[in-house]
Amino acid sequence: MDHNKLALPVGTTLDRFIMRKQEDFPYATGELSQLLRDIALAAKIVNREINRSGLIDIAGAYGSQNVQGEDQQKLDVIANIRFIRALRNGGEVCTIISEEDEDMIQTGNNQGKYVVAIDPLDGSSNIDVNVSIGTIFSIYRRVSPTGTEGTEQDCLQTGTHQVAAGYVIYGSSTMLVYTTGNGVNGFTYEHSLGEFFLSHPNISTPKTGAIYSVNEGSSEYFSEAMAAYVAYCKQQNFSARYIGSLVADFHRNLLKGGIYMYPATKKAPNGKLRLMYECNALAFIVEQAGGKSSNGRSRTLEIEPKGLHDRSPLFIGSTELVEKAEEFLAAEYTDALASM
Ligand code: AHM
Ligand code: MG
């Protein structure tokens, strides 16, 4: 009997994969690899907390608001503590921006070469109802000299400067998907072994798709051009799919093809999503997978950030669908210019 069939190989762990990738860069010091491993460790711990949240007293509101004035859930706060602690203990990161903290967080590791922007737990409205939620992160190399505290300039780099980005989806299975600018790879968590295993190598997103994801409950506040694009999606017989967890909506569309939209509305002129720790990471990933991301007019990754918590409209997914949305929205911008 073939021994291999008796005991099938378990596959490539995330740790081994990261190490192999590091070997491709002869002068790599291993710090970025260690940083990715720190994030994966925190993700495992957060995954554990999420899985048992119905059983212990960590579901529900925490009783405070974050910098955006949104009610924090206990799990938002727990995830924030877990990720920040892992990044602080790791030593590679000098400064962190988090959705949950108004100011930059100095880790005290002034020798750290990297800056991280993170949304520790995205999809707050789904936390308590057992629907997929996620973590989103971007990693930048600092521009200030090492040995000092990180600066705002380190944090406010355009998305084109990301050295790595990824997300964790806590869904029907837990996955970590990341890029270091050389393709996108996805890893599925194996609970019994406590490891992420490579399950989705070299993810490539379809050029087009038949899914549109937008909160149509806000359509009263859409511009005419935006409403016209949604009508176009319907004429094409696209399916509407909207979970209300960005990571989950993005992940589905990445694999199946489609477009996710959080537009500028009359109520929220810059949309809702945050550039530094929501839009840029996913924009980097989608481009690496062959897709596209835009604010409706220009490439997400080239938007100059002005503040840590800037918002940006987001149109992200299959290239053809994002380009079509831009075509529709161009009419709006031409009208706006004409009336100036
Ligand atoms: P959060 O960071 O408070 O969780 O908000 C971000 C979430 C995204 O995950 C999701 O796509 C969007 O907000 C949903 O917003 P809306 O309820 O307006 O459709
Ligand atoms: Mg968020």
Image (cartoon, rainbow, N blue to C red):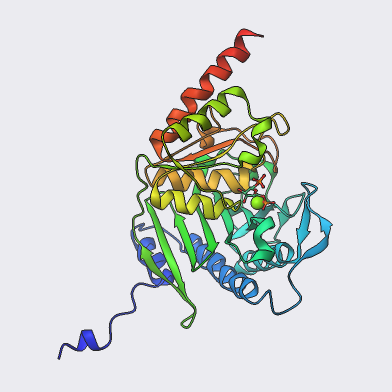
- Quarter of the image with the C terminus is top right
Q: How many numbered marks appear?
A: 0
Residue 198, by quadrant, is bottom left
- Quarter of the image with the N terminus is bottom left
Q: Is residue 84 visible?
A: no
- In the image, taking residue 144 as reference, residue 234 lies left or right, namely left
> Above or below — where is 277 with respect to 192?
above
Q: Nearer the viewer, residue 119 or 253?
A: 253
Task: Name which residue lies at 56% across and 68% down.
Answer: 38
> Above or below — where is 204 with respect to 42?
above
- In the image, taking residue 268 as reference, residue 174 lies left or right, namely left
Task: Name which residue lies at 61% across and 58% down.
Answer: 93
Residue 227, by quadrant, is top right
Residue farthest to the left? 1
Residue farthest to the right? 63
Residue 89, by quadrant, is bottom right
> Above or below — where is 38 with respect to 143?
below
Q: Is residue 232 visible?
A: yes
Residue 9 position, x and y percent, is 29, 80
Q: Nearer the viewer, residue 218 or 195?
A: 218
Task: Name which residue lies at 51% across and 63% down.
Answer: 36
Residue 240 position, x and y percent, is 50, 44
> Above or below — where is 171 with respect to 233?
below
Q: Nearer the viewer, residue 221 or 274?
A: 221
Residue 72 position, x and y percent, is 77, 58
Residue 52 position, x and y percent, is 65, 77
Q: Nearer the viewer, residue 135 or 249?
A: 249
